[in-house]
Image: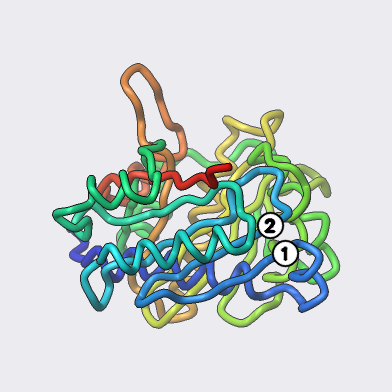
């Protein structure tokens, strides 16, 4: 059954999860990373100065309660400029782009980057497919909720699985374990953590985040098991809709993560560009 969910709710799910993710660490950790967060209109604006991956400075959640304007985008870019951020992503659902977006981009120096796919799934449908007798079960692995004492080890695996430098992801990800509204899971091979995934619940919506498996442990069903474990946690928390995102498939490419989600009953909601802002010297 198709899931009907507005772009504003889909974008809000990710925006509020990331706001919680980047503001969750202690003040000392945030200061060490140069992490700051603010809101410009209805957009969440996140900055991490000491981020070698240049991934965690991003603005998203635009257009949920008010139209996107040139003034709003200028204020977002000024926030990054004032903090010496070299590069940031602006993520806007296609439905909220203003008519003068090309002019705004030219004025602020924003270029087109890679695209992501936003996907949604009904909890009941995902769990029904997960419990189907014909579904392939994992090979030599299992999933477990992350214990607080394993938070750093789990977060380090998340960073390595995504091919990101350890700093700053480890400190931010570890801070979510045991935190309100967060549910973290590990893929285990024996006692070794080889995969990670977490979920942030807000009301009846559960945002999936950080799902990845180390290269040497892939193709054994680990990512699907992470999806299932988080869907079960969402159901226990009273959520009815799941939201996730992954890279869009370009011509001639295959995104296993996307197809794992589709097999479990997730549906593509829309494709969203990552608009790239860079500081000009």
Residue at 64% x, 64% y is 184
Return the x and y of residue 89 as percentages of the image width and height.
47, 50
Front position in the image: 247 or 48: 48
Examine the rendering and report whether any part of residue 233 can be seen: no
Q: Which mark is first along the chain, 2 or 1? A: 1
Residue at 57% x, 72% y is 37
* Element type where label 2 sits in the image: loop
Residue 225 is left or right of residue 125, and the answer is right
Give the image quarter of residue 36.
bottom right
Give the image quarter of residue 102.
top left
Compared to residue 123, the image places residue 168 above or below, namely above
Evaluate if marks 1 and 2 touch, with contact meaning CB atoms under 8 Å apart.
yes
Q: Residue furthest left?
A: 99
Q: Residue furthest front?
A: 281
Gap in angstroms between the C-alphas marked 1 and 2: 5 Å
Return the x and y of residue 13 as percentages of the image width and height.
40, 69
Residue 175 is left or right of residue 251, and the answer is right
* Element type where label 1 sits in the image: loop
Return the x and y of residue 50 as percentages of the image width and height.
73, 54
Residue 49: image tag: 2
Return the x and y of residue 87 as percentages of the image width and height.
55, 47
Image quadrant holding the N terminus, namely bottom left
- For label 2, count other residues whose C-alpha is less than 10 Å away and answer few (under 14), some (14-19) or many (20+): many
Tell me the residue that label 1 is attached to. 34
Compared to residue 116, the image places residue 207 above or below, namely below
Give the image quarter of residue 248.
top left
């Amino acid at each position: 059954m198709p899931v009907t969910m507005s772009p504003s709710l889909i974008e809000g799910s990710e925006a509020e999860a990331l706001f919680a993710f980047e503001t969750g660490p202690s003040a000392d950790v945030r200061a060490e990373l140069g992490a700051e967060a603010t809101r410009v209109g209805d957009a969440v604006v996140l900055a991490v100065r000491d981020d070698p991956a240049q991934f965690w400075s991003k603005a998203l959640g635009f257009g949920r309660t008010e139209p996107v304007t040139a003034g709003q985008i200028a204020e977002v870019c000024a926030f990054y400029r004032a903090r010496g951020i070299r590069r940031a992503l602006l993520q806007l659902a296609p439905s909220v782009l203003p008519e003068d977006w090309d002019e705004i981009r030219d004025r602020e120096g924003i270029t087109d980057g890679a695209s992501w796919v936003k996907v949604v799934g009904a909890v009941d449908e995902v769990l029904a497919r997960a419990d189907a007798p014909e579904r392939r079960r994992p090979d030599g692995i299992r999933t477990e909720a992350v214990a607080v004492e394993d938070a750093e080890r789990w977060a380090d695996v998340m960073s390595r699985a995504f091919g990101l430098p350890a700093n700053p992801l480890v400190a931010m990800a570890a801070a979510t374990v045991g935190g309100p509204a967060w549910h973290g899971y590990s893929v285990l091979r024996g006692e070794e953590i080889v995969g990670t995934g977490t979920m942030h619940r807000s009301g009846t919506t559960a945002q999936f985040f950080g799902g990845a498996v180390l290269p040497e442990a892939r193709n054994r069903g680990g990512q699907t098991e992470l999806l299932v474990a988080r869907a079960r946690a969402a159901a226990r928390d009273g959520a009815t809709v799941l939201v996730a995102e992954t890279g869009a498939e370009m011509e001639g490419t295959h995104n296993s993560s996307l197809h794992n989600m589709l097999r479990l009953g997730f549906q593509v909601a829309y494709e969203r560009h990552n608009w790239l802002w860079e500081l000009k010297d």
